[in-house]
Amino acid sequence: MTRPSWRAHPEDIAAILAARHPDPFGLLGLHETEAGVVIRAVVPGAATLAAETPEGVEIGVLERVHADGFFEGLTALPARAPYRLAAANGENAWRFDDPYGFPPYLGPLDDHLLVEGAHRRLYERLGAQRVTHEGVEGTNFAVWAPNARRVSVVGDFNQWDGRRAQMRKRVDSGVWEIFLPGVGAGAVYKYEILGRDGDLLPLKADPLGFAAELRPSTASVVIENAPCQWGDAIHMAERVRHDPRRAPMSIYEVHLPSWRRGADGRFLTWDEIADALVPYVVDMGFTHIELLPINEHPLDASWGYQPIGLFAPTRRHGDPEGFRRLVDRAHQAGLSVILDWVPAHFPTDEHGLARFDGGALYEHPDPRRGFHPDWSTAIYDFGRREVANFLLANALYWLDRFHIDGLRVDAVASMLYLDYSRKAGEWAPNPDGSNDNRDAVAFLQTFNELVYGLFPGVVTLAEESTAWAGVTKPTFAGGLGFGFKWNMGWMNDTLRYMSCDPVYRKWRHNELTFGLLYAFEENFVLPLSHDEVVHGKGSIVAKMPGDDWRRFAGTRAYYGFMWGHPGKKLLFMGQEFGQTGEWNFAAGLDWGLLDFAPHSGLKDFVRDLNRLYRGRAALHARDCESDGFEWVVVDDAESSVFAFLRYGPDRSRPVLVVANFTPVPRHAYRLGLPRAGLWREILNSDATLYGGSGVGNLGAVEARAEGFAGFPACADIEIPPLATLYFEPADVGLE
């Protein structure tokens, strides 16, 4: 018997049911034939299937031509008219809109922009987008997998059956898409991918998934795209009006899962974090909160630095809306929020980006450039436009959708050098033999140009530990374009000095002065970060030599020196109150230590430091300019005394910083000063309220109009043991 021309070929039916058909939309759904309009569908579990108008009028019965649920039949439906399907099996009956009855949601412009690497709002098109398409509510799924032979969306809504939602390939871009009517917020899903070699890959989470399941589960989750109600208009307007280089920036670095835990050891919710963290940071006087990566990540021990879901706030604390509320609460309290962002590498977990469509896609195909030996992670192919676009769109996503105020880019040094952490023969040089990763350099420059061009007032910060020139120079001058760079050299030198017994510090004097030789070559942040209080390094207090009194005195003196030094400030959580043990990512901080005076005294000192720092322009307005700093005492290695002046725009309102890093008080210590008159002692780390010995200058010293050490005036001051003092002319005050 001759098969009617409108009937599907048995080979096509077999390919569809095996989920290996090259063009499922070319077979399934509504199609015009010479015999009329035919509808084909795959509905496993259905005994009968009929086509109806949206109003419920039957327009044709579809015949089950394969026991696995392949139906087809001629209908009285006009060409391109909307329809629904009515299925039944015994007493069970259900109606649904056919995904293959809908045209594409994406358009040619999406293809063009993605291929060109210029789709800045990729997050509005790819991923799981809750939309109304052709008058029907549902979710459009779209994923880039150019080398795949087939991609399906699978989830609870289709029994994780890869035959039911085989996607349409957009050949111009390699994006696969399908609109699934009725799939709403909360639906759990992954992509089932047939790789380039015809192998079925492990199920993949959505690279643009906006939410995810709580680990160890790994699926993506559909969320609503409803507009957010923000209450931070004042903050958003204010951040545009100031120059971050000349504004106070005192950053409290936080790993949210271990800042504080619930009574049962559980993770706090976003709202519980907001209730506790925001008022605490405000009370402590910090200006910014910097969060270790909050992107979804499978391994707690990675601290978030091996993210899988770059677009998804971690489910550990709740849903994405909860994170938005946290940022909004911080903004309303006057705090800025910085996120640690990780474009340098990604983990190779099978549900993630690694070999996403069966081969190297997001990672560089050459393992000498695509694999990181230190972390056993994959390295992005920064030279591939679609990959760079993915990362750039991710950065903009956090700034746009979550009002983030800054992005601190992790592991920049590993991006800049082709031979980073590699021996000879393990890396591939440029054609001219050089070792700079030019694709990564171009990527970082574009990243900074986009951030500063599209989001005025936002800052970018680089964790860059080498002598790469021009990290914070503008891109038009050949720089990378970052706003700030972490000063890792200053951190290493000063911590090495402070961990040395005071009796030997006179031979290491240059470790505290060397940083001023390059302090203004970049816009620096002075970081005492999480990396310095883990892996056997000890907490900041634990690094200090001596008994408990000396350790806490040394910590206060060190913080006083740091807050007075040019550069913005960053302090990791727990170090503000002298956490004695190393940071443990699996438990909350030791808040009970605040019951003891040395810890509460240190906390009070940091609070007062921040308030003073914010209230004196001399301490922050010229952090990045050499005219904001002047040495007073630079060479007294024998006494381990340092003194310098900080200036703001008004040079008549300086702050004098004096530090003594020995346990020996210095009596009648003579200093040169820029003016005679009364100088108030506005901060003394040795004050008894902080746990010190109470040595000081009774609130002020009198400077005489007598030249000394190149200055027109001088004063004799008392310098307490292991202490830092701040002075200012008595006729000035808060600015």
Image (spheres, helix red, strand yellow):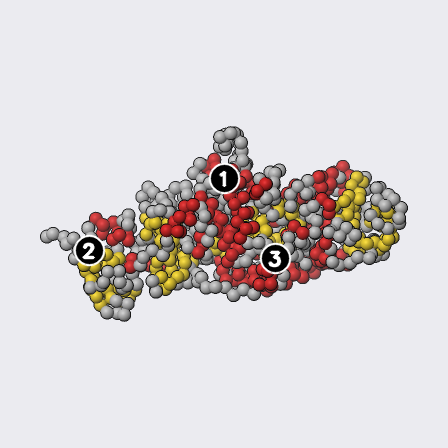
For the question of whether residue 555 can be seen, the reply is: no
Residue occupied by mark 3 = 239
Say whether disc 1 or disc 3 marks the residue closer to the N-terminus.
3
Structural crowding at the residue carrying mark 2, measured as other residues with C-alpha within 10 Å and reported as few (<14), some (14–19) or many (≥20): few
574 or 41: nearer the viewer: 41
Task: Indicate the secondary structure of the residue bearing disc 2.
Answer: strand
Report crowding for label 1: few under 14, some 14 to 19, many 20 or more residues within 10 A (C-alpha).
some
Whole-angstrom CA distance, mark 1 to mark 3, is 32 Å
Looking at the rendered structure, the kind of residue marked 3 is Arg
In this rendered view, identify the residue nearer to me: 154 or 433. Answer: 433
Closer to the eye: label 1 or 2: 2
**Residue 218 spot, x, y in % from top left:** 43, 54
Q: Relative to 303, does residue 469 appear above or below in the rendering? A: above
* Nearest to N terminus: mark 1 or mark 2: 2
Q: Nearer the viewer, residue 336 or 279?
A: 336
Label 3, label 2: how far apart the Cα atoms are: 61 Å
**Location of residue 275 with respect to 650 vertically, above or below:** below
Q: Residues within 10 Å of mark 3 (few under 14, many from 20)?
A: some
Looking at the rendered structure, the kind of residue marked 2 is: Thr
Residue 322's x, y, as percent?
A: 52, 62
